[in-house]
Image (cartoon, rainbow, N blue to C red):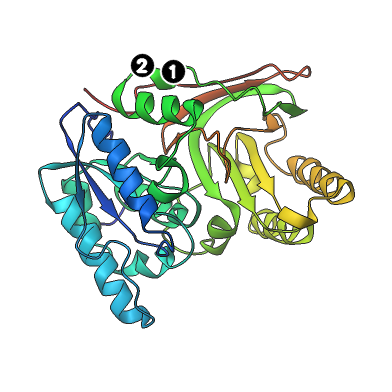
Amino acid sequence: MFCGVMKTITPKALHKGDTIGLISPSSHCAYPEKIGQAIGYLEKNGYQVKPSRHLNCIDTDPAIADQHKLHDLHEMFREPAIKAIICLRGGAGASRLLKKIDYSLIADNPKIFVGYSDITALSLALFAKTGLISFSGPMLTTELYEPTPYTEEHFWEMLTSPSYALSLRNHPAHPVTCIRAGEAEGSLIGGNLSVLSSMIGTPYLPSLNDALLFLEDINEPAYRIDRMLSHLDNAALLASCKGVLFGQFGNGAENTKEEHLRLQNIFAYYSEHAHTNGPVMRGLSYGHIRNLMTIPVGARFKMRVTETGDFSLGALHPVIEE
């Protein structure tokens, strides 16, 4: 197994005519017609598409399911014609794969890897074990079957233009709230809070020293967000972060005014436990939302937020190579 991170690995940019591989390392999709729509969308944009052998397969035996998922993941990284890999959806199951992944294979065959939510486990593990920058962004049956213009722009520009990440913009519908003003530089590390917090104490969570920590979650009441952030705090991980970016934290029917206020107070409380001089904001266009920012996991970025909510986020180096 590949051990340690020698350097950050920047994947090659996508070009028209390239082949995109499709895998389902987490849950299956109950609406297979969305897969066809997503494939049509990718092809319409000028790319060839190769579904993996076990795409959207269902097996109630986790041992068999894991064999299928690992086969597809390894096959897509092994195949030279595949230039990018996009996940079907989130859900559950990706964390079971971490001990069994051939990280040497991936380090030797770096390429674009995209997914968020439960796929957070894979993105963080790939960076921790190989240094590969991956992309926490839209997936086939959650966004790409019918993406919004904002999601489209961030997705394609991030994967095709080395200069795009130098300045990312939030969606107008997501106002930025400054919790603590300032600016900082660091590696973008994060994703789904539930998944990330479950990885504490494992070798698959990258170091949060010098990190810009970005987080989101869905269908989690405030008391559970509190519990997970306290776990990060008690593990002495928040204090090492240079900055924190809270994304969208929807919780469905429980999203009352009281619950919303409780959640904002929790963010403010734990922000005091992060780096004492580091910026903290909430409202990032990232999470289980229609207008979704694509975030390069592991890339070096600079963030700045002012008391009035002026916000900037930009890469210090290209996140993909020509």
Q: Where does the image place residue 168, in percent across and percent down from the top left?
A: 50, 21
Q: Which residue is mark 1?
A: 166
Three-letter amino acid code at disc 1?
Answer: Leu
Helix, strand or loop at disc 1? Answer: helix
Quarter location, residue 30 = bottom left
For the C terminus, give its image quadrant: top left
Q: Which residue is mark 2?
A: 163
Q: Are marks 2 and 1 in contact (CB under 8 Å)?
A: yes
For the N terminus, give its image quadrant: bottom left
- Which residue does the image show at 39% across and 81% down from the upper left? 60
Q: Compared with residue 62, is residue 15 higher up or lower down, i.e. above or below? A: above
Three-letter amino acid code at disc 2?
Answer: Ser
Helix, strand or loop at disc 2? Answer: loop
Residue 141 visible in image: yes
Q: Where does the image place residue 109, in percent across and percent down from the top left?
A: 17, 46
- Which residue does the image show at 70% across and 29% down from the upper left? 277
Q: Where does the image place residue 166, in percent across and percent down from the top left?
A: 44, 18
